[in-house]
Image (spheres, rainbow, N blue to C red):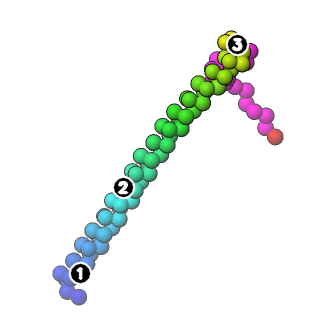
Amino acid sequence: MDKREEQARMHDQENRAEMQIRREEHSMEAGERTLERELKAFDEAEAQAKKKIEAELRTEHQGHEPERRPAWLSDEPEADPPVH
């Protein structure tokens, strides 16, 4: 193999490696965007669930605040669950 063929082969290997890196980067970026969309959807669903629970509590208590408010509305920190 002469010097030109060797250089061409090495250049081709470098190009393939760079393209593989770019493909992996694009794949990771797409995965990141997917996770961001899923997190946003989760946060929205969580907020909607909290609102629904609050509305149900008001209905159950004839429009008054319940004795024990949901944890996300409480000013007091939640107690850690018992460890078994």
Residue 2 in the image: above or below residue 28 = below
Asked whether residue 51 is drawn in magenta, I would say no
Left or right: 30 in relation to 45: left
Residue at 56% from the left image edge and 29% from the top image edge: 48
Q: Amino acid at mark 2?
A: His
Cα–Cα span, label 3 and label 1: 84 Å
- Which residue is more in the foreground, 9 or 61? 61
Contact flag, marks 1 and 2 (Cβ < 8 Å): no
Q: Quarter holding the N terminus? A: bottom left
Magenta stretch, main secondary structure, is: loop
Whole-angstrom CA distance, mark 3 to mark 2, is 54 Å
Give me the disc on residue 62: 3
Image quarter (top left, top right, bottom left or bottom right) of the C terminus: top right
Q: Secondary structure at mark 2?
A: helix
Residue at the farthest right position: 84
Where is residue 62? Give x, y as percent. Answer: 70, 13
Residue 78: image x %, image y %?
69, 25
Q: Earlier in the sequence, mark 3 or mark 1?
A: 1
Labels 1, 2: front one: 2
| Residue occupying image coordinates x 73% and y 27% | 79
Q: Which mark is residue 26?
A: 2
N-term-proximal mark, 1 vs 2: 1
Q: Residue at x 57, y 32 (%)?
A: 46
Q: Nearer the viewer, residue 19 or 61?
A: 61
- Mark 1 is surrounded, within 10 Å at the Cα level, by few (under 14), some (14 to 19) or many (20 or more) other residues, namely few
Three-letter amino acid code of the residue under disc 3: Gln
- What is the span of residues highlighted in magenta in the rendered image? 67-83
Q: Amino acid at mark 1?
A: Glu
Question: Which residue is label 1 attached to?
Answer: 6
